[in-house]
């Protein structure tokens, strides 16, 4: 149970800090804007902080897409994967609830929760972006957490990878690459965020599946080359 609670807390922190930056300090908000770069670093630094806080307890997935990738590469059981995802979603909902409470009287002009979304007619672009960037992100995670990976720097590498993904993807979808991160805010945002939520669930999971199979493919090749 401790590792499931750790995943819940970690995901709550990710949503609260990352989405909170978009709500309170993003461009167009009533407070000093930090812009795309600031929001990207808020998400990345949240992952770094949590990786070195709960990494030894749960591995710090705090993302159902990562959990799926880990499951498909045979690093965890189906039971653990299912419970990880359940607690990650609970954590995202808790983080979104806190953020909604703090933001509802703040004067935010766009979103109270940092929900993901895309413009009308751009569904295909959003789906491809979320799939590709999740693939890249999960591939990084699988690589740096491998047995022969640079594990001491895993948290830093994963956090910086998430920063890079956000810098490019924020203008397209607000960046999800994490179904839990999208589910929590969408529940409180409602409207278009809920209507478009399926994209931010299906596309990241598809990206994770691709990453798992690619990783298994290149590691098998590397093993063959070294034998």
Image (tube, helix red, strand yellow):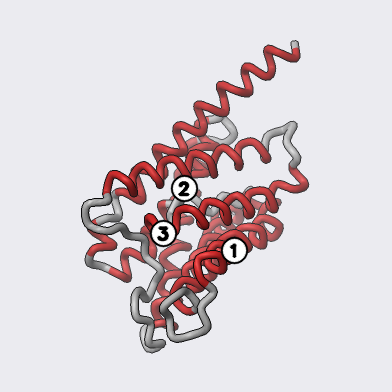
Q: Which residue is mark 1?
A: 41
> Crowdedness of circle 2 by 10 Å Cα count: few (<14), some, many (20+)?
many
Q: Residue at x 63, y 16 (%)?
A: 221
Q: Is residue 57 visible?
A: yes
Q: Position of residue 212 (x, y in %)?
A: 51, 31
Residue mark closest to the camera, 1 vs 2: 1
Residue 111 found in image quarter: bottom left
Residue mark closest to the camera, 1 vs 3: 3
Residue 23 found in image quarter: bottom left
Q: Which residue is mark 3?
A: 171
Query: Judging from the image, what secondary structure is the residue with disc 3 in?
Result: helix
Q: Residue at x 62, y 18 (%)?
A: 220
Residue mark closest to the camera, 3 vs 2: 3
Left or right of 37? Residue 225 is right
Query: Judging from the image, what secondary structure is the residue with disc 1 in?
Result: helix
Query: Judging from the image, what secondary structure is the residue with disc 2 in?
Result: helix
Left or right of 169? Residue 34 is right
Q: Position of residue 197 (x, y in %)?
A: 30, 55
Q: Which residue is mark 2?
A: 64
Distance, label 3 to label 2, CA atoms, is 23 Å
């Amino acid at each position: 149970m401790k590792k499931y609670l750790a995943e819940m807390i970690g995901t709550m922190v990710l949503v609260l800090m990352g989405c909170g930056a978009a709500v309170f300090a993003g461009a167009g908000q009533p407070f000093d804007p930090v812009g795309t770069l600031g929001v990207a670093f808020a998400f990345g630094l949240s992952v770094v902080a949590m990786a070195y806080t709960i990494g030894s307890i749960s591995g710090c997935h705090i993302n159902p897409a990562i959990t799926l990738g880990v499951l498909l590469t045979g690093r965890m059981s189906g039971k653990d994967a299912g419970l990880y995802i359940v607690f990650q979603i609970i954590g995202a909902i808790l983080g979104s609830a806190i953020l909604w409470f703090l933001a509802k009287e703040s004067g935010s002009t766009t979103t109270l929760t940092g929900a993901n979304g895309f413009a009308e007619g751009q569904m295909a672009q959003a789906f491809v972006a979320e799939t590709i960037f999740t693939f890249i992100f999960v591939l990084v995670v699988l690589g740096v957490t491998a047995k022969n990976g640079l594990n001491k720097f895993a948290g830093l590498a994963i956090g910086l990878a998430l920063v890079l993904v956000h810098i490019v993807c924020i203008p397209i979808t607000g960046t999800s690459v994490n179904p839990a991160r999208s589910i929590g805010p969408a529940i409180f945002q409602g409207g278009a965020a809920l209507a478009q939520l399926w994209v931010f669930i299906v596309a990241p999971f598809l990206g994770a599946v691709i990453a798992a199979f690619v990783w298994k493919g290149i590691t098998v090749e590397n093993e063959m080359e070294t034998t």
